[in-house]
């Protein structure tokens, strides 16, 4: 594989007595797709939060390309080209599908957000009110982009482009989130359980889309519970349990790893015994 | 040195009183994540019930305290049962607005029953002072300290050793888990509101006795002080609230010792702003707390705004534009002038509270900044009035945004607290900065409205002036909402975490919203100054902030047309029905409550 896009070293996050993410190392090459799997509460989403700046690590570093981005703010990381979706879904409920996805393209606004220090925000306000031709053209271009992105979801979203997101089905809201992430034109995409709550047909559709994105060369970090999808898509799989990385490698190899089986089945058995008692 | 001991004792005593209010607020925040803006009103009710008991029924002191505690607790239970419980599954903004509405209704009911004139509340204790060290202490001081310490101990024992106390602590820690374990959350809420109200009522009684005076203005002050103490101690932290209260009492007392009485509140609110900026989780929170759990659901009620066709808006604008040419009375024009002034304030607030979700309770301060700037520019520097008003708008935009910026990192109910406090700070600075603002005397002889050298004195010309100003601001705001800024603001309102993850800087966009909104409010204040020809620090008060908020909710949060329709309705309808002035605030409060309960999206829907 090519150059390293993302590299985590000793990344750690503690909540009180609980170590949610425990000294995680990870290297993700350009164009690679790595899946992170593990039982609920293994620390997968916390790891995503640390990479995307929504939470700050207690120890360890995050490097993106050649830059140390540990502790960067989420808005700065978005500008660097890191996009993510959220596990429970965080669409903007009162915004239309179009506006939701346009927010994804926010960091690509140039004409209306001149990079001028100090008075930049005031210029932005003025340009938004005056709307010179360049600003209008940029907005039009982004709207066309959004339609192209939405077309990737077939007829799921395009007919609902002006509907507010709160009126969409659960699966469609997940799709809007992914469309919003794509509108950022990300260099690194983090998907947090993109198929949660989807039926088998919808899951297959989503799997096809992620495969397409990978084929286009996008670098992807994926959290997913549906193992079949993980096995088909991933270049490598990382297994987390109780904050630690317990296995790493190609899907087939990880699948047979006794530690992994124990993490899944062992937990299952103990909880069963507890609830039986 | 002796006086320092006196100030210390005074600070601790006053701190004890604040603690009674703040502990109630902390309990309520703990179990329901709600800042109860009606807490001060319960304190007010407690003071007046105490007055009835002492002056009219001549009850002995212990009985007075019991009567006040029981009556106040009843009020608390009623608020919980009928005001808040129906909103349990509502959007996050609903209970906040409901407690604001309840507070206005209660205050007005007390004012209508007892008249707004201050009353004396005798202390029922012998007026002697004991020497201790270099200072003195009276029996009332000891009573207050005694009540404060006793309530704290009782509360501690109750929370620690009673079953209901456990339930309260469990609910505060994790409401869902508590419910799953069979805790009756409604009962917990009842208990908490009852206890909080009883403590608040007793506090009102003691303060009334301490200053030997009660009046209806006490309510807002008490809410503010209680909230300051609670936030300083860490929201929801009961022992923290006690320590925060004592600290607040001491800061105020020493501040008064050094600078004089009129600075008392200024210190309280500055303390709040400093804590919010430096340690937003309170003095006793661990430096880095786990981030708050993701807030699910939207902040405002989702709805489809009512689409009004463009031709209908054009016709309506045309009708109002030619209205003065029709045979209408000056009285109608005067009413509509007031409506357009309120309309401009509502445009500002609907952008800030509705579009970007920062429910500002101190919006009248922006009026005041605009009014003072415009008045002083035209009086002192002979700037033409038209330009002076624009200057007022710009000053309001700049200064208002700068003042509010410390609160940009806050979320939800905290923003309301901060804006309320900042509004009070503006009013206090105007009162105390005599060299510029002429202090309590106010500014008189402000030149009338004029444009290009022509004075606008006829009601018709004033009507056109304010109408056009409002229409221009509304058009600009409509254009703003249609730009990328409109969707960015609304995205931040709906989910600020997702917004940040997509590159939207909260500071930047909240600033832009306040700059734009500050300008509209400043222009409204500027026009008002030239209309009234006299302004002082009380011309633009919290009542106007709440009135504007009611207008905004009525019209639909973020809805530009709704803000104007709401302003015309709330100013016009009381005139149509000839409702006496003293009942109007009461009616606004009730309208706010009914809206929150039955039509949270307002008349025209949220945008």
Image: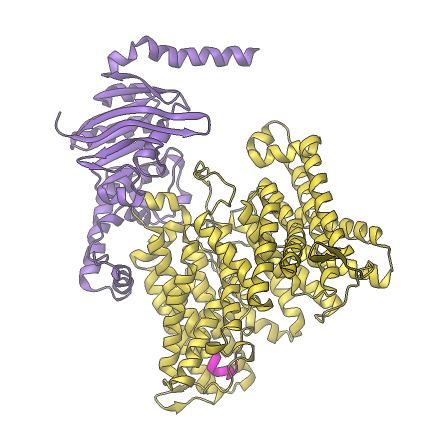
Quadrant of the rendered image containing residue A259: top left
Q: Is residue A198 left or right of residue B107?
A: left
Q: Residue B221, how many percent across, how many down?
A: 61, 61
As rendered, which of A28 and B158 lies closer to the eye?
B158
Coloring basis for residues: by chain
Q: Is residue A197 left or right of residue B242?
A: left
Residue at image position (60%, 67%) is: B261
- Residue B140 visible somewhere in the drawing: yes
Report the number of discs. Answer: 0
Residue B530 is a magenta residue? yes
Q: Residue B87, how many percent across, how many down?
A: 59, 47
Residue at image position (65%, 56%) is: B5
Quadrant of image for the C terminus of chain B: bottom left
Which residue sits furthest bottom? B454
Q: Give, as a single range, the part of the protein colored magenta.
A: B529-535
- Residue B558 visible somewhere in the drawing: no
Q: Is residue B181 left or right of residue B328?
A: right
Quadrant of the rendered image containing residue B352: bottom left
Chain shown purple: that is A
Quadrant of image for the N terminus of chain B: bottom right
Residue at image position (44%, 49%) is: B278
Quadrant of the rendered image containing residue B166: top right
Residue B452 is a magenta residue? no
Which residue sits furthest left? A2
Q: Residue B455, how many percent across, how many down?
A: 42, 90
As rendered, which of B397 and B148 lies closer to the eye?
B148
Q: Colour of chain B?
A: yellow
Q: Residue A200, how many percent across, how many down?
A: 34, 24
């Amino acid at each position: 594989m090519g150059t390293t896009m993302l590299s985590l070293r000793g990344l750690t996050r503690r909540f009180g007595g609980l170590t949610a993410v425990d000294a995680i190392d990870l290297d993700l090459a350009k164009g690679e797709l790595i899946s992170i799997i593990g039982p609920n509460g293994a620390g997968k989403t916390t790891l995503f939060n640390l990479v995307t700046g929504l939470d700050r690590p207690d120890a360890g570093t995050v490097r993106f390309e050649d830059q140390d981005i540990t502790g960067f703010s989420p808005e700065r990381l978005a500008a660097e080209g890191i996009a993510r979706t959220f596990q429970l879904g965080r669409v903007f409920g009162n915004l239309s599908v179009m506006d939701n996805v346009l927010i994804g393209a926010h960091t690509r606004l140039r004409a209306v957000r001149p990079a001028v220090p100090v008075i930049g925000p005031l210029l932005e306000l003025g340009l938004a009110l005056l709307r010179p031709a360049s600003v209008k053209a940029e907005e039009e271009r982004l709207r066309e982009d959004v339609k192209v992105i939405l077309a990737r979801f077939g007829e799921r979203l395009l007919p609902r482009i002006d509907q507010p997101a709160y009126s969409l089905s659960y699966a469609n809201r997940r799709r809007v989130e992914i469309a919003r992430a794509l509108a950022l034109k990300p260099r690194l995409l983090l998907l947090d359980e993109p198929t949660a709550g989807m039926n088998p047909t919808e899951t297959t559709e989503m799997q096809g889309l992620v495969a397409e994105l990978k084929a286009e060369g996008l670098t992807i970090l994926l959290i997913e519970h549906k193992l079949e999808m993980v096995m088909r898509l991933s270049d490598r799989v990382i297994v987390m349990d109780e904050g630690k990385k317990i296995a790493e490698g190609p899907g087939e190899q990880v699948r047979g790893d006794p530690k992994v089986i124990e993490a899944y089945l062992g937990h299952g058995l103990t909880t069963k015994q507890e609830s039986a008692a | 040195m002796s006086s320092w001991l006196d100030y210390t004792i005074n600070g601790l005593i006053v701190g004890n009183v604040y603690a009674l209010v703040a502990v109630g607020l902390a309990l309520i925040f703990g179990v329901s994540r709600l800042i109860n803006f009606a807490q001060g009103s319960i304190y007010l009710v407690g003071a007046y019930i105490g007055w009835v008991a002492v002056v009219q029924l001549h009850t002995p002191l212990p009985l007075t305290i019991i009567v006040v505690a029981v009556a106040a607790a009843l009020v608390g239970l009623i608020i919980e049962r009928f005001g808040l419980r129906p909103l349990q599954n509502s959007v996050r903004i609903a209970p906040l607005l409901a407690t604001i509405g309840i507070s206005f209704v209660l205050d007005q009911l007390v004012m209508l029953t007892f008249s707004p004139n201050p009353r004396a509340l005798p202390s029922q204790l012998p007026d002697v002072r004991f020497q201790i060290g270099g200072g003195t202490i009276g029996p009332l001081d000891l009573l207050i300290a005694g009540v404060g310490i006793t309530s704290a101990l009782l509360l501690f024992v109750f929370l620690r050793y009673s079953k209901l106390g456990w339930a309260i602590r469990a609910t505060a820690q994790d409401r869902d888990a508590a419910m799953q374990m069979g805790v009756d959350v409604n009962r917990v809420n009842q208990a908490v509101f009852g206890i909080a109200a009883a403590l608040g009522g007793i506090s009102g009684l003691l303060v009334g006795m301490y200053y030997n005076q009660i009046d209806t203005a006490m309510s807002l002050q008490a809410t503010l002080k209680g909230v300051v103490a609670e936030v300083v101690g860490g929201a929801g932290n009961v022992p923290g609230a006690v320590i925060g209260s004592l600290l607040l009492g001491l800061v105020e007392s020493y501040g008064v010792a050094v600078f004089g009485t009129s600075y008392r509140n200024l210190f309280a609110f500055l303390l709040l702003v400093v804590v919010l900026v430096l340690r937003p989780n309170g003095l006793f929170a661990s430096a880095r707390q786990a981030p708050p759990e993701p807030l699910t659901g939207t902040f405002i009620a989702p709805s489809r705004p009512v689409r009004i066709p463009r031709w209908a808006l054009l016709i309506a604008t045309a009708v109002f534009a030619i209205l003065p040419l029709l045979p209408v009375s000056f009285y109608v024009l005067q009413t509509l002038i007031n409506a357009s002034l309120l309309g401009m304030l509502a445009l500002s607030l609907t952008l800030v509270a509705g579009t970007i979700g920062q429910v500002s309770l101190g919006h009248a301060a922006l009026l005041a900044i605009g009014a003072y700037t415009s008045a002083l520019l035209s009086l002192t520097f002979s700037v033409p009035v038209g330009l002076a008003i624009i200057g007022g708008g710009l000053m309001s935009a700049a200064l208002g945004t700068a003042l509010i910026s410390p609160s940009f990192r806050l979320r939800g109910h905290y923003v309301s607290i901060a804006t309320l406090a900042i509004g009070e700070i503006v009013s206090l600075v105007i009162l105390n900065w005599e060299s510029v603002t002429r202090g309590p005397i106010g500014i008189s002889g402000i030149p009338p409205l004029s444009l290009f050298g022509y004075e606008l004195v006829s009601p018709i010309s004033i009507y056109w002036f304010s109408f056009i100003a409002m229409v221009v601001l509304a058009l600009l705001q409509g254009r703003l909402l249609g730009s990328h800024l409109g969707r960015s603001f609304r995205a931040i309102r709906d989910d600020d975490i997702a917004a940040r993850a997509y590159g939207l800087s909260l500071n930047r966009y909240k600033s832009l919203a306040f700059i734009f909104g500050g300008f509209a409010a400043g222009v409204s204040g500027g026009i008002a100054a030239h209309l009234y020809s006299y302004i002082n620090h009380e011309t633009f008060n919290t009542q106007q902030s709440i009135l504007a908020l009611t207008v905004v909710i009525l019209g639909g949060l973020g809805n530009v047309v709704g803000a104007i329709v709401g302003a015309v309705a709330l100013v016009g309808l009381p005139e149509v029905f000839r409702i006496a002035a003293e009942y109007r605030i009461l009616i606004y409060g009730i309208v706010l409550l009914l809206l929150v309960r039955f039509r949270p999206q307002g008349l025209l829907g949220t945008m």
